[in-house]
Image (tube, rainbow, N blue to C red):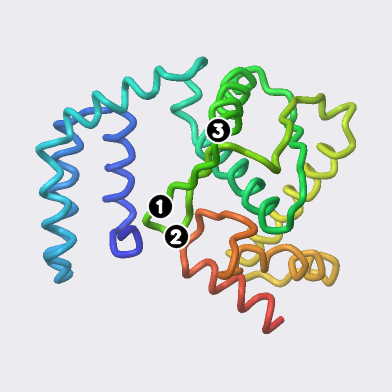
Amino acid sequence: MYNLLPDEYLSEFILSYNEASSTRMGTCIVNICNFLDSMNQKDLSEKLRGGIKYLEDNLESEKKSHESLPNKTMMSLNVPTYIAYINLLEKVGRRVNGSFTLIHDKTKQFEESYHELFSLYSSVSKNYEFPLTDGNSILLGFNQLKKFSFADSKENEWIQASDILASVLGRVLKTIYHNESFNEELFNLAKSVLPLLLVKEMKLAESICSDKMRTKIFRAMVYK
């Protein structure tokens, strides 16, 4: 849907969501629906309108969920990213029959929450897998991701290496996004890592980029 809407509609929705105002969000959704109607997206428009009457209850429920973990960590994208990542590692481990240990850079805000979440997902005595509508699934009861801990990046070479990799990948993706050319070293790194975002048989990495951006990544890898 976000590919259809002008930026000002999306910006207003983000502001209304951050403000947690059901009135402002309702007005925002009505404006979005009117725009979708003008684009002949009647079905999507009707579905969005149907949710307006539940806004107040949903926002109240979300407010309570934000208080379920310490240090306001549930209000951050770090938490769902962390949950997705530990699930991804467990899935890969089950596929290749390998065991993993996860080490995270020390972080005062998230340390307590991450330990709590790891215990919640990993310590269930029986394995469960709950399929999601997007093709992913949530696992409970870890067999392959054996241990989770924190370490100081100043002392841990693995964390230092991952920081460097993340920085370089960010540079590669920014270069692709802006349709800029990149040197041979960056291209070789991109060829070895970025295809993980495009694998269909088994997801080896997660991304929040659009299909349009994935297409740009693919073309950059193939047609350079």
Mark 2 to mark 1 CA distance (whole Å)? 6 Å
Q: To which residue does mark 2 refer?
A: 135
Where 26 falls versus 120 (above or below)?
Answer: below
* Residue topped by disc 1: 132
Check whether the beta carbons of the residues at disc 1 and disc 3 lie within 8 A of each other: no
Please give the name of the residue rendered at 64% of the width and 60% of the height, measured from the top-left corner: 173
Out of 53 and 169, give the one closest to the viewer. Answer: 53
The reply to whether dot 2 and dot 1 touch (C-beta < 8 Å) is yes
Secondary structure of the residue carrying numbered label 2: loop
Label 1: few (<14), some or many (≥20) within 10 Å?
A: few
Name the amino acid, label 1: Leu
Relative image position of residue 64 (x, y in whole percent): 32, 20
Query: Is label 3 or label 2 in front?
Result: 3
- Relative to 53, does residue 154 appear above or below in the rendering? above
Identify the residue under disc 3: 121
**159 horizontally vs 121: left or right:** right
Q: Tag 1's secondary structure? A: loop
Q: Position of residue 76 (x, y in %)?
A: 49, 31
Q: Hey, what amino acid is under mark 2?
A: Gly
The mark that comes first in sequence, 3 or 2, is: 3
